[in-house]
Amino acid sequence: MIRLLLYALGGLLLGGIIHIAVILLLPDFANRDAWTSLGRFGRDGTFHLLPMAEPGTEALPYLDPEMAYAACRFSLEGGPVRIKAAMPDDFWSIAVFNRRGSNVYSLNDRTAERADIDLVIATPVQMAQLRENPIAALNQSIVIEVPITRGFALIRSFVADPTLVARTEALLRAADCAADLPATDSPPPADPDEKN
């Protein structure tokens, strides 16, 4: 009976130590999200070419070694973000992720039915503003509404042959991830308090 009591007490003590250790280590692991991992490649608002994936050295988990990748961290706090890129003829896709790396939107060359990427990412409030004051320069853009304020876009492009790597990487480096949109076509509503 005493031995059983000692085992139970030891189990409770060990459980308490593990619980405290997990709580102390949690902030360190919480900062290791996909957003933070991509921060080491350069400043936000710019596409950065990720190194070609090799087993055990991927910049992000589950990258395909047959693909070239570029990533751009963005914030929608200052307004919508427009992504433009000329893409090669082979398969390409773009995906938008939240900070934790969960996919919130994706598109590829077949579903887009076009050879280039022209994507505007906006919050629900920004989307309402774009509907109220449309921008003619965005008529050909795919405009999406996402429930996030910070995230990252990941473009991937299939590299059919090793001789095409340099060309594909050049196109990915030239991709644009800008926060500035053209001015609206309609003038802002007049201030009712403004005197003539």
Image (cartoon, rainbow, N blue to C red):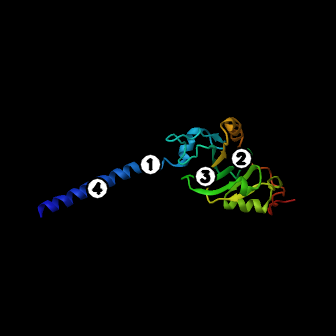
Neighbours of disc 1 within 10 Å: few (<14), some (14-19), many (20+)? few
Task: Return the x and y of residue 192 as percentages of the image width and height.
Answer: 80, 63
The mark nearer the N terminus, 1 or 2, is: 1
Q: Amino acid at mark 4?
A: Gly
Tell me the element at label 1: helix
- Residue at the spot 76% in from the left edge and 55% down from the top edge: 113
Query: If the image is split into quadrants, where does the N terminus sit?
Result: bottom left
Sequence-wise, the earlier of marks 3 and 4 is 4
Where is residue 156 drawn, in percent x and y? 65, 47
Picture disc at residue 16: 4
Residue 19 is situated, as x and y percent measured from the top left of the image, at 33, 55
In the image, is residue 127 above or below residue 174?
below
Q: Residue at x 69, y 37 (%)?
A: 164
The disc placed on residue 29 is 1
Identify the mark at residue 150; answer none if there is no mark: 3
6 w.r.t. 52: above or below = below
Mark before the other along the chain sequence, 4 or 2 = 4
Asked if the residue under mark 2 is in contact with the one under mark 4, i.e. CB atoms within 8 Å, the reply is no
Image location of residue 115, percent across then percent down:
77, 49
Q: Earlier in the sequence, mark 1 or mark 4?
A: 4
Q: Which residue is mark 2?
A: 90
Tell me if 177 is positioned left or right of 16 in this view. right
Horizontally, residue 118 falls left or right of residue 162, namely right
Between the C-alphas of marks 1 and 2, the distance is: 38 Å
